[in-house]
Amino acid sequence: MRPEEGLRYSKISILKQSRAGGKFQFFVMVLLQPDPFLNELTSMYERTMEKGSVWVTLKRSSMKSKVKRNKMTTAGDAIEYRCLVRATDGKKTISTSVSAKDHQRFQASYATILKAHMHALKKRERKDRKKATEGDKKKESMKKPSSSTKASL
């Protein structure tokens, strides 16, 4: 589903300098609302079920330029920080901005999506703690009689 198909979104143009040739280019980052973002993230996980990966990054952001932040701090205004969440599968990139008051609800929904789509992970092989400690005790007891036999001779 593309943003043009009825999703609520806003565009933020970012001016970046490309490394090849040093020319400036505009990159458009599409910010979805949190609920459509979670829907898109779910579909992204489903598309990459057989082959592929999804990278999700979370970052603290004020969504203001450095100049505006400096002006606000000198004026004594409080800066509202938000959580910028980006997800990509290498072909498509989506992002959203979550406020502090909506963070708990978003995090719960995000955790549900992660739990639902992490079924292909292998379980870690662990030694039982009891078996490990019993094995260590046996090794120690085997070493002690050998030293006691030397003392008795």
Image (cartoon, rainbow, N blue to C red):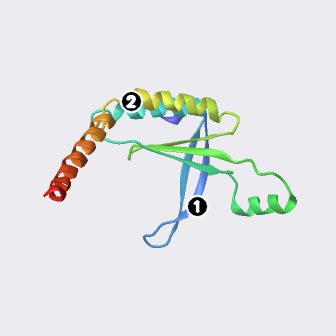
Residue drawn at (66%, 45%) of the image: 82
Asked if disc 2 and disc 1 are in contact, CB closer than 8 Å, the reply is: no
What amino acid is found at the position of numbered circle 2 in the picture?
His
Q: Give residue 15's mark.
A: 1
Residue 147, relative to residue 91: is it above or below?
below
Residue at image coords 55%, 30%: 36
- Residue on which the image places disc 2: 117
- Residue at 52 percent of width and 35 percent of height: 3
Q: CA distance from mark 2 to mark 1?
A: 35 Å
Residue 101 relative to residue 30: left or right: right
Which residue appears farthest toward the left when viewing the image?
153
Can residue 121 be spotted in the picture? no
- Tag on residue 24? none
Look at label 1 and name its amino acid: Leu
Find residue 128 and report its horizontal and vertical position in percent: 30, 35
Image x and y of residue 8, in percent = 60, 32
Name, please, the residue furthest toward the right.
Answer: 75
